């Protein structure tokens, strides 16, 4: 969408856009989700050609999705639909609409059994040896919080000093949906975080309460955290052929954490709470098994009859 089209949308739908922006902030959507959803809604509103959203129907939503179909995968189409659904939910909440036509449109089928990319536990341990330099302790803690506590990159970014409770051995995490989650920490991580709190650079602003501070004395950004982790993965890939073609990222550390716990036999409901998922169905994608696990399971099966029947 070019600037002229954007200005046109803002002139026609300023009140709707403002309402959606307020609603997303109140709902606790991340900055990245707000930007993505707002971008989709701008494009959708432009497709309405001046028609007010409260008078639209299912056909308007389908027309919008079909116009993008050749450029998008099923997953991308579903994200667009989720944005439009949220937009109408916001309008209904603010009494600017009475129905949500996007709820009448079905999501595209995606590959439900697609396995998440994850590192084995020994590869997680191997990764740690590639973290070095002046800020090794800080960067190790960042890696461990995602790989051994399951934090999202945004949750690491938002972590404040007073979210770490050394005496109790826990951190409180402000996650999706404006929900707080209390996570018990392994003793090793408690010790590392305690050391980092002592070594922490004096912030540029006196009121800055960020746990992780950059060398310039500002809260470490999401991009900087991603760079720290990506540099570690780059070094790992050069030495480990098994992971050389994997698309590794901060979120894959979260996958690795969930997979590690489930392989150790931790109840999926406990994993759900640690990850801060609202639905256990989301957690269930991590319950994949490999061929060796299948073979071991079947080796334990004892058929109580002779093969000579």
Image (tube, rainbow, N blue to C red):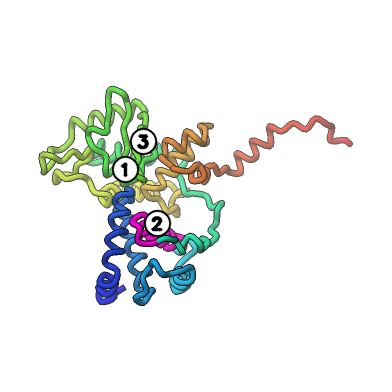
- Name the N-terminal-most of marks 1 and 3: 1
The circle drawn on residue 181 is 3
Q: Is residue 39 left or right of residue 266?
A: left
Q: For mark 2, does the 10 Å Cα neighbourhood hold few (<14), some (14 to 19), or many (20 or more) residues?
A: many
- Name the N-terminal-most of marks 1 and 2: 2
Q: Is residue 145 left or right of residue 307?
A: left
- Discs 1/2, front: 2
Segment colored magenta = 78-97
Q: Is the stretch drawn in magenta largely helix, strand or loop?
A: helix
The C terminus - image quarter: top right
Above or below residue 246? Residue 62 is below
- Discs 1/3, front: 3
Q: For mark 3, does the 10 Å Cα neighbourhood hold few (<14), some (14 to 19), or many (20 or more) residues?
A: some
Seen at 39% across and 36% down, the residue is: 148
Question: Residue 285: percent from the left, percent from the top?
Answer: 52, 46
Per the image, the residue denoted by label 2 is 89
Q: Secondary structure at mark 1?
A: helix
Per the image, the residue denoted by label 1 is 155
Above or below residue 297? Residue 86 is below
- Name the N-terminal-most of marks 3 and 2: 2
Q: Do the residues under discs 3 and 2 have CB atoms within 8 angstroms?
A: no
The N terminus - image quarter: bottom left
Residue 75 lies in magenta, yes or no? no
Does the rendering let one see residue 71? no
Q: Secondary structure at mark 2?
A: helix
């Amino acid at each position: 969408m070019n600037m002229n089209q954007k200005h046109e949308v803002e002139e026609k739908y300023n009140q709707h856009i403002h309402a959606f922006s307020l609603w997303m902030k109140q709902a606790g959507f991340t900055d990245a989700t707000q930007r993505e959803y707002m971008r989709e809604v701008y494009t959708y509103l432009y497709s309405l050609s001046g028609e007010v959203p409260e008078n639209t129907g299912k056909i308007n939503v389908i027309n919008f999705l079909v116009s993008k179909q050749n450029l998008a995968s099923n997953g991308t189409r579903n994200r667009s639909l989720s944005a439009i659904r949220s937009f109408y939910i916001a309008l209904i909440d603010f009494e600017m609409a009475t129905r949500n036509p996007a709820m009448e449109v079905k999501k595209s089928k995606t590959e439900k059994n697609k396995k998440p990319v994850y590192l084995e536990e020994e590869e997680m341990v191997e990764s740690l040896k590639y973290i070095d330099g002046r800020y090794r302790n800080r960067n190790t803690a960042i890696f461990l919080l995602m790989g051994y506590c399951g934090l999202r990159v945004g949750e690491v970014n938002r972590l404040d000093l007073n979210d770490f409770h050394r005496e109790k051995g826990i951190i409180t995490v402000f996650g999706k949906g404006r929900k707080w989650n209390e996570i018990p920490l392994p003793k090793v991580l408690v010790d590392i975080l305690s050391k980092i709190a002592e070594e922490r650079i004096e912030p540029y602003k006196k009121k800055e309460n960020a746990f992780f501070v950059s060398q310039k004395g500002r809260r470490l950004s999401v991009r900087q955290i991603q760079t720290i982790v990506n540099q570690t993965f780059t070094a790992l890939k050069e030495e480990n052929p098994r992971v050389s073609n994997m698309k590794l990222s901060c979120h894959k550390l979260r996958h690795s954490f969930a997979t590690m716990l489930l392989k150790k036999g931790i109840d999926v409901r406990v994993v759900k709470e640690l990850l801060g998922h609202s639905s256990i169905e989301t957690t269930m994608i991590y319950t994949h098994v490999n061929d060796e696990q299948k073979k071991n399971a079947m080796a334990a099966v004892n058929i109580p009859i002779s093969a000579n029947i």
